[in-house]
Image (cartoon, rainbow, N blue to C red):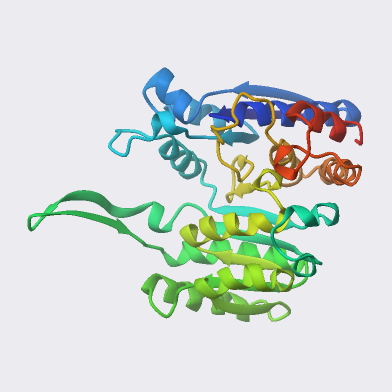
Amino acid sequence: MNLHITLLPGDGIGPEVIAEAVRVLDAIAARYNHTIRYTERLIGGCSIDRFGQSLTEETLADCLASDAVLLGAVGGPQWDDLNAKDRPERGLLALRKGLGVFANLRPVKAHPPLIDASPLKPEKLAGVDLIVVRELTGGLYFGQPKERRLRNGYEWAVDTLEYYDYEIRRVIELAFRLAAGRRKKVTSVDKANVLESSRLWRQIATQVGREHSEITLEHVLVDTAAMRLIASPAALDVVVTENMFGDILTDEASVLAGSMGLLPSASLGEQGPGLYEPIHGSAPDIAGRGIANPIGAILSAAMMLRYSFQLEAEATAIEQAVERAIADGARTADLGGTLRTTQMTDAIVAHL
């Protein structure tokens, strides 16, 4: 196949981990006789510095013209002014909206050799293999009005949590499709005892559940879901939830794997290129030191091969190579090891 991938390395450790993901993709291309063309563009803080915008129209157009987008991370303390006209995170939100990627898939799996890297007791981690499906282009992060102003002599701020029924239905239907190929269980997370948007969410989840009687559906309030992620994570299969809840819960779920540096994600829409990125941030405290864990970015590339190109054998080859490298003791600093970023990738490529 001929693959066209837009690279958005971004800020902090983003360029370091994306470079390693590209090394793995090139190794896969050589072994499976594919051709990959890369287009590299700026996003986030580096784009603000260069163009005065966190995401330019030209960069978005290049992303839309490619087959898939691989993103590193955005943000850093130098762009952390709350009163700034533009911020790195705004470019990320605009990218998701522009690509129309409404569902963010975040798999979480506990690797047996890394059990000691997690703060949880080993018995809590046995059999943990779940995927969180987060609605990505609606809810509190995009709702309007969103503003700050003086009101009755006081400084006032408002954010709006809004959803249309079709936005909820499409992401829940995707969760059920994923569950059909897994353990046939969907956990829908909401706050229906308080929020009107969550009551609509639960209503539609129930309707979709009736259309898929072979799959078990359970409704869980978000505070209970946060507890269950720690207390009984192995009981979860496919978890589907709205934008902000998913943002928070997936960071919590990262401790199950032992490090945020291990976890990939895929953001998918109904058509057009998918967006793939590790779930970690830009980690400015270690940027440029060559010690970042590249596994999240490498596994994101594997998800890209699976979902955007339907190259299941190639995706599985990467995932198995990561598993074998970990089983052989390859560890970066976040996992208590001494390997540098490039050395971790060397260990993975050696197992392809």
Q: How many marks?
A: 0
Quadrant the C terminus occupies: top right
Give left or right: position of 68 versus 148: right
Residue 101 higher or lower than 198, as above or below: above
Q: Residue at x 51, y 24 (%)?
A: 42
Image position, residue 120 (x, y; %): 71, 63
Q: Does any portion of residue 7 appear in the rendered image?
A: no
Quadrant the N terminus occupies: top right
Give left or right: position of 198 versus 109: left
Image position, residue 247 (x, y; %): 52, 55
Q: Residue at x 51, y 71 (%)?
A: 222
Residue 263 higher or lower than 171, as above or below: above
Residue 54 higher or lower than 223, as above or below: above
In this view, the residue in front, 13 or 85, is 13
Give left or right: position of 265 versus 152: right
In this view, the residue in front, 321 or 293, is 293
Q: Residue at x 88, y 27 (%)?
A: 33
To which quarter of the image does residue 57 belong?
top left
Q: Residue at x 49, y 29 (%)?
A: 43
